[in-house]
Image (cartoon, helix red, strand yellow):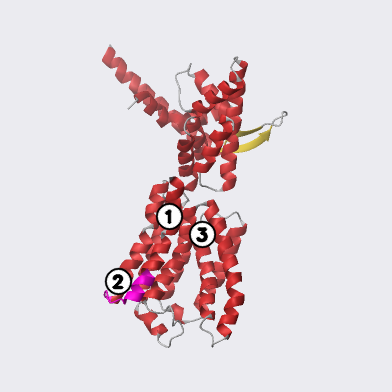
Amino acid sequence: MSSISHYLNRFKDSLQIDQTIRDGVAQELYTHLEEKTQDLEEQGLSREEASKIAVQSLGSPELIAEQMYETHAQGSWKEALISASPHFLVALLFTSYYWQNIVYPSIILALTVGIAVYGWRRGKPIWLFPWLGYYLLPVVVSGILLLSLPEGWGWMAALLYIPAALFVFIHIMRQTARRDWLYASLMLAPMLVTFAWFSSLGMGNEILASDWAARLQANALWITVSFVGLAGATVAFIRLKQRRHKIISLLIPPLVVLFAVVAASGGNICTWSWLLLLFSLSAFAVPLWMQAKAYQ
Amino acid sequence: MNYGRELLKGNTDSLLLCLISRQPTYGYQIVKELQERSNGYFQFREGTLYPALHRLERDNLITGKWQVLPNGQQRRYYYITEDGRQVLSRRLATWQDFSTAVKAVIQTETT
């Protein structure tokens, strides 16, 4: 492999932004390196020596990638607000008990599907990923609900539904992670916050229990706090420039949820619920762990 | 910390805007022009130029367009925008005032 190809591969491996932008910058660097190499060759250097000097003059590819990331990864305030809006909408559902009226959740669901599909088709802009999380939430919840159908029917429906749902989920997850593991974390956040509350309220296996609405209502304030925390973390994630700061912002939601759940229950959570809660929150760290591995 | 490097860092955007305002140009040409016009005074890691160009483009001060040369090679030419011209004009005026003030102080000290 030539020193120029090796250099560009190192650059591309270090830069996790939109593939189109990354390839464009790599092409610019390639043109620069080729032109400098040609100039040096005209001065009498061999191709190998010339390309080596050209690469050295450009400097560390990791450093350029880091600076380029800071330029492209910071979203505008507008993008930050669009990203945080689904969290605010869900928080509003619980603040005003709108969740009890099927019309409001339905409007939010329709809005979510529309915006997620629009963003997915328009090149997956940075504001899309929280919306995608809510888009996937009903896909997963529907699978769980199917298991609660009368005996026999539930499993049959699940057998048909789960492979299709898994296909959609894995496809979106792979596409997102390919772009950036941190976006996968951002996307999973609403799902994990929801499951954390489900598990802590003991609704994992009895979602259709008669008192589920009462339990939700009793904890509405703390559920709202969780989603507002998620919205705050999302705004911070979009606005921050440096990657390490973005990672830290993604650690805020699990901590807020943990605090909210413990505060709501007064610390009175059974062992099984604790396990489910910690499992939900630790799942949040998987994409972050993948990112740390990629760094190494 | 190298004072000259810090000065260059603080004025990179203005230097780039100034060069691009004269004629549309591309990365490697900018590096050569900066070195030639400054008689080799401005020495820097050439790769740091590209994040600076993209930052200016993100702020809508310049715009980049790909052009295919007759030999098939692709180059990204940068053009200054109207916002870029206004920002450059303001920065040049500030720089002139600053430079005049610094000179006046230095001359007073040395005479």
Looking at the rendered structure, the kind of residue marked 2 is Val
In three-dimensional space, the C-alpha distance between marks 2 and 3, rounded to whole angstroms, equals: 28 Å
Q: CA distance from mark 1 to mark 2?
A: 24 Å
> Is the Cβ of the residue at disc 3 closer than 8 Å to that at disc 1?
no
Where does the image place residue A89, in percent across and percent down from the top left?
Answer: 46, 69
Q: Is residue B60 left or right of residue B41?
A: right
Question: Is residue A276 found inside the magenta-colored segment of the image?
Answer: yes
User: What residue is shown with label 1?
Assistant: A288
How crowded pointer 1 is (Cα within 10 Å; few <14, some 14-19, many 20+) is rated as many
Kindly identify the residue that appears in the image at 60 percent across and 75 percent down: A161
Viewer-side residue, A73 vs A143: A143
Q: Badge 2 is on which residue?
A: A262
Quarter containing the C terminus of chain B: top left
Image coords of residue A134 (percent x, y): 50, 67
- How far is the residue under mark 3 from the one under mark 1? 15 Å
Q: Secondary structure at mark 1?
A: helix
Location of residue B66 by image quarter = top right
- The answer to whether residue B26 of the structure is visible from this angle is no
Magenta stretch bounds: A266-277
Q: Earlier in the sequence, mark 3 or mark 1?
A: 3
| Occupied quadrant, residue A37 | top right
Badge 2 marks a residue whose secondary structure is helix
Q: Which residue is mark 3?
A: A129
- Quarter of image, res A204: bottom left
Q: Amino acid at mark 1?
A: Leu
Sort mark 2 into few (<14), some (14-19) or many (20+) by Cα contacts within 10 Å: some
Mark toward the viewer: 1 or 2: 1
Q: Chain of mark 1?
A: A
Residue closest to the eye, A48 or B76: A48
Residue at x 45% of width, y 66% of height: A190
From this view, report whether residue B52 is shown above or below residue A205.
above
